[in-house]
Amino acid sequence: MKYVKLRYLILMLAVFSLTVSSCTDYLDIVPDERATEEDAFANPNAAKDYLYSIYGYMPNKRSSGSLDLMTTDEIVTAFEHENFAQFPKGQYTPANPVIQYWSGLYKGIRQGYIFLNNIDSVPELSERKKTEYKAEAKFLIGYFHFLLTRMYGPIIIQEEVVDVDKPYEDYKARAPYDETINHIADIFDEAAKDLPAKRSGSEYGRATSVIAKSIKARMLLYAASPLYNGGGKSNSSYYEGFTNDDGTQLIPTEYDPEKWKRAANAAKDAIDAAESVGHTLFYGEDNVSADLPEDPVEKRLRFTFMYEDSPELIWTETREEGPYGLQNKSTPRVSEWSGTWNGVAPTITILEAFYTENGLPIDKDPNYNYEKRYDIGTNSNGTTLNLNRHRGPRFEAWISYHNSYYEILRPEGDQVLMKYRKYDNGGIQDRSENYSPTGYLNKKGVHPLLDQSSGLGINQQYPWPKIRLAELYLNYAEALIGYGQDLETAKKYIDKVRKRAGIPTIDEAWAPIGGANDQETLRDIVRQERTIEFYLENMRFWDLRRWMIAEDYLDEKLEGMNIQGETDEEFFNVTKVNFPRRFDTPAHYLMPIPQREIDRNPELVQNPGY
């Protein structure tokens, strides 16, 4: 198992070095503040353990309990009973936020400031290490602030260790959104100056200057987007009248195009920093040990972040995947007790978002029969929906459809021919759970060498992407397009991602239909590229919101095939999945601050709509 570097970090991030051998849940353990000065800073090793423990407040992005992994219109699952499924149903309130990060992230910020206040007192710790450790703690403080703004919008800026016994009249109010963003950007800049540009070996996964620049660029892109920028060019903000009790406006209601320029500059700075230390897009399919997929482009796409030495990975989630994670939940069912739950199902919405083999949207490609996409056709394995034919390599690499192969180890071979009619191997059969609600299965993030013959265990662990270079390229392109200048450069950076995906450049693909050279067309293109490239990578939850289009996609039932159909004619019919979906505007554009926090702080106003 080539997972050594990640295991190093898992061992490192234990709170106390004596417990590292059993630290599966190391990121859920926090130090005891009561022993801070006596124990946590008594020597260099204790101080390092304390620093590592601050990472424990980071939400686990690969967990099925994550707020943003399986909670949009990309997929629908057979696991509607789980907590994450309450979000697409709109069943979260201030009294019951279901998944909330407010209190945990502020605890992490507090731990960061405790560390900064005490690190200089540690005996026998070199000045060089003190400087680096301070920068790392500052990065985490900035990162936790960013996560709070992404989820809640304007937040309370924390600049010190808060006295837990301070009187109510000293509690702080929420800071205006732009003020918060500027404050966090300054923290990232300060941290980046003293962080190493890259880490390896036992330090893999810790903060670097490239990570700090990359998160800053992402944050500024969000700040330039319509939700936080006066509604964009339309000047149709949801936040007129959203103020503190003293009348302070909390989210801008006027559009500022210069925010796009700032975001573009930050993205380019991050790109230059990443490329200068060797980060490139992944083209290493020849180094992958798996024989399948046979197509080299599909293999490249399948292993973009599953290959442990992928140069594209800038920051990753290093916690190992558990038995109830994405891989087991996605894979074809074998038996009742195999740990293969056949239940992460792509929707018609995401299937139609993928390009044709010519690199065009399916409704724009003159060589694709869009009107007959729901007719029955054939491929080399038999009948299938026309929607599944003549699609780009990302579709083939990441989507399992009727009469296609699912690459995974089984006693009978290293791939399974999948069929999804009611009594087929991928069908619902007579089960009430562990089935595909749409007649498709997800393959992205599932390792082709995953062997589940021994039950629930996961024999293929890999780093889950938090930031990869492709995001920086598309962030830069989107910001340039938003600003409306240097559109040719924007196309160049989108084309880097398209080339790796095995499809033509924008100019080559769009030439037959009049080209793509204006701002609005390119805006649609970069959004579709993000939708495809970052399918099931924690992005769409936030993208739909910051673009202010979430109600168009998240407020209606999703669609798939008729999974009760026993024949081709019955199965190949677009059918609503009978799970409720709700998105309330404007409430669900931001998450609710937990009611107990509102009750605790008289200065804290709730987000609109709750």
Image: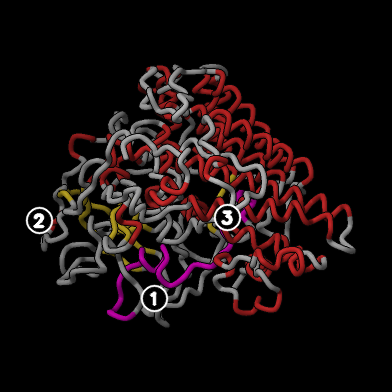
Mark 1 or mark 3, whichever is nearer to me = 3
Residue 362 in the image: x percent, y percent?
30, 35
Q: Residue at x 71, y 64 (%)?
A: 36
* Lower position in the chain sequence, tag 1 or tag 3: 3
Residue 530 in the image: x percent, y percent?
45, 38
Residue receiving disc 2: 570
Q: Nearer the viewer, residue 522 or 264?
A: 264
Q: Is residue 550 visible?
A: yes
Q: Which mark is residue 410?
A: 1
Residue 332 falls inside the magenta stretch: yes
Q: Local crowd at mark 1 within 10 Å, few (<14), some, or many (≥20)?
A: some
Give the Cα distance between marks 1 and 3: 45 Å
Mark 2 or mark 3, whichever is nearer to me = 3
Q: Nearer the viewer, residue 214 or 164?
A: 164
- Mark 2: amino acid: Glu
Q: Is residue 492 above or below residue 109?
A: above
* Lower position in the chain sequence, tag 2 or tag 1: 1
Residue 246 falls inside the magenta stretch: no
Q: Secondary structure at mark 2?
A: helix
Q: Is residue 195 above or below residue 424?
A: above
Give the extent of the magenta segment. 310-337
Residue 608 in the image: x percent, y percent?
35, 34
Q: Is residue 88 left or right of residue 8?
A: left
Residue receiving disc 3: 107
